[in-house]
Image (spheres, rainbow, N blue to C red):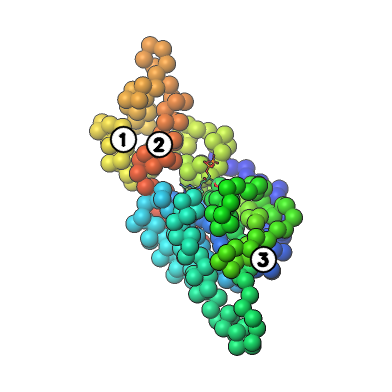
Amino acid sequence: QQINWYPGHMFKSFKEIKENLKLMDIIFVLVDARIPFSSMNPEIQKVLGNKPTIILFNKMDLADKSKLKKWIEYYEQKGFTCLEIDAQSGKNVNLLKTTAEEVLKEKIEREQNKGLKQRSIKTMVLGIPNVGKSTLINTLSNRKSTRTGNTPGVTRSKQWVKLANGFDLLDMPGVLWPKFEDETVGYNLAVTGAIKDNILPLDDVTHHAIQFLQTNYLSRLKERYSDEITENSEYVEVLDIIGKKRGALISRGDIDYDRVYMIVLNDLRTKQLGELTFDLLWENMKMI
Ligand code: G4P
C-alpha cells in the first residue's frame, strides 16, 4: 500500500528550504533514533549540497542503544558528523555548540586570521514531521512552546532567536518529506507515530509491528504479554493472547481487536516494550 504524503507541497518545500540554507553556517538534520533510515529524507544530499551538516539522532531515550551505535557508524562513514540527543529532556543538547564549532573549525579560523570579529553561528533545524524539531528549538531557546507547523517548507516569516550559546537559530524548522514510496518505511513511520494513525490501516500497522517484534525482540513480547507467544505464532493468535491477557474483550469473550491494536502500538511507543530500533542496517545498507 502506497502512502500519499504531501507530494503537492514537495517542490515548494524544497525551494523554500534551499533559499534558507543559503543563509546558514551549519544545518542540524533531525532523524528519529528508532528509525534512522526511515526518518531520513530520501533526497537529503540534494537538499543540503555541501552545506556543513550535523545529523541529530533524536529520541535516543526510546532507541535500542547497540543498534543506534551501528547506525551512527554508518552515517559517520558517509562523512556526516553525528550526535544522539533527547530533545525533550535536553540530554546532549549542550553538545550541539561544541560539535558545530568542531565542524566549522577551519572556517572560524580563516575568519579569525582575516581579523574578523567572532560572530554568531547561523543555523536551522530540518527534519520530517514529528521527529522533534519544535521540541529541540524550544529546548535550545528555553521556551515552553512555539508555533511551528507540520507543513513542508518554511511557511512563517523568518525570525531569528539569539541563543545564549552563540547560535542564531531560525525559529521555524524546515519540514522535509519522508521516503513515502517504500512500504517498510511507511510502516516504520506509522509504528513509531511519525505519521498519523489514520493514514495506514491500524490492523496492517500492528501486523507489521508484531511480526517485527517476533523476529527481533521476541523476549520483550513474552515478558510484556505472555510466554505463549513464539516466533512462529500466527498474527491472530498473538492478538488473541494479548487481548485475553489485557482484557480487551467485547461481549461473550470475543476479542476487541481495535483495542488490541491500540494496546500494542501504545506500549511500543511509550517504551513499555523497552528500547526499540526498527530499521535494520543490513537491509538498507545499499539504499542511501
Ligand atoms: P516536529 O516539530 O518535528 O513535528 O516534532 P515535535 O517537536 O512536535 O515532537 C513530536 C513528538 O515527539 C512530541 O510528542 C514530542 O514531545 C516528542 N519528542 C520530541 N523529542 C523527543 C525526545 O527526544 N524523546 C521523546 N521520548 N520524545 C520526544 P507529543 O507532544 O506527545 O506529540 P504527539 O505525539 O501527540 O504528536
Q: Label 3, label 1: how many angstroms apart (C-alpha)?
A: 46 Å
User: Does ligand 1 reach within 8 Å of label 1's beta carbon?
Assistant: no
Compare residues 203 and 249 and report the one nearer the observer: 249
14 with respect to 204 (left or right) = right
Residue that badge 2 annotates: 267
Crowding at label 1, few (<14), some or many (≥20) Cα neighbours within 10 Å? few
Q: How many marks?
A: 3
**What's the amino acid at mark 1?**
Arg
Residue 156 x/y as whole percent = 73, 52
Answer with mark 1 or mark 2, whichever residue precedes in sequence. 1
Q: Is residue 242 visible?
A: yes
3 and 1 marks in contact (CB < 8 Å): no
Q: Amino acid at mark 3?
A: Leu
Residue at 41% in and 48% down = 62
Q: Residue at x 48, y 35 (%)?
A: 204
Question: Local crowd at mark 3 within 10 Å, few (<14), some, or many (≥20)?
Answer: many
Instruction: Classify mark 3: helix, strand or loop.
Output: helix
Residue 21 tag number: 3
Q: Is mark 2 within 8 Å of ligand 1?
A: no
Element on which disc 2 rests: helix
Task: Return the residue found at the far front.
Answer: 164
Percent of width and height locating residue 139: 54, 54
Vertically, is 69 above or below 270? below
Horizontally, is 95 left or right of 154 in the view?
Answer: left
- Residue 273, horizontal then vertical, whole percent: 35, 40
Check disc 1 and report the residue beneath it.
224
Callout 2 amino acid: Asp
Q: Which of the marked residues, 3 or 1, is nearer the chain's N terminus?
A: 3
Counting residues from the N terminus, which is met first, the one under dot 3 or under dot 2? 3
